[in-house]
């Protein structure tokens, strides 16, 4: 949503998104990242072996 305000220089607008404050992004532990990468690699390897054997 865009708000229009009357400023000294004339009509200006302020985006409502720029006014909102957001919590800090999720601080993920690096071990979680490595675990997700390992799971993805293992799943891809499993799928590859499955497709070769079938």
Image: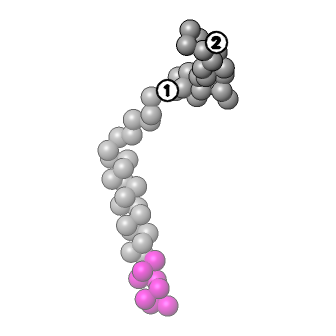
Applied colour scheme: one colour
Q: Whole-percent x and y of residue 28?
A: 39, 40
Q: Whole-percent x and y of residue 53?
A: 44, 90
On screen, residue 41 versus residue 50, left or right, reads left
The front one of 31 and 3 is 3
On screen, residue 12 versus residue 53, left or right, reads right
Asked whether 51 falls inside the magenta stretch, the response is: yes
Q: Is residue 33 positioned above or below 28 on the image?
A: below
Residue 6 bears which disc, if any?
Answer: 2
Under circle 2, the secondary element is: strand
Report the residue at 66% width, 22% height from top.
Answer: 3
The front one of 5 and 37 is 5
Judging by the rendered image, the residue that carries numbered circle 1 is 23
Asked whether 17 falls inside the magenta stretch, the response is: no
Image quadrant where residue 27 sits: top left
Image quadrant where residue 13 sits: top right
Q: Is residue 7 positioned above or below 14 on the image?
A: above
Residue 37 bears which disc, if any?
Answer: none
Report the residue at 39% width, 75% height from top.
Answer: 45
Q: Confirm whether residue 20 shows in the render.
A: no
Q: Nearer the viewer, mark 1 or mark 2?
A: 2
Give the mark nearest the N terminus, 1 or 2. Answer: 2
- Magenta stretch: give its range: 47-54
Report the residue at 59% width, 11% height from top.
Answer: 7
Report the residue at 45% width, 28% height from top.
Answer: 24
Under circle 1, the secondary element is: loop
Image quadrant where residue 18 sits: top right
């Amino acid at each position: 949503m865009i708000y229009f305000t009357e400023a000294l220089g004339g009509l200006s607008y302020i985006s409502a998104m720029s006014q909102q404050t957001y919590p800090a992004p999720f601080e993920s532990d690096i071990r979680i990242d490595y675990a997700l990468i390992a799971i993805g690699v293992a799943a891809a390897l499993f799928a590859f072996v499955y497709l070769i054997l079938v």
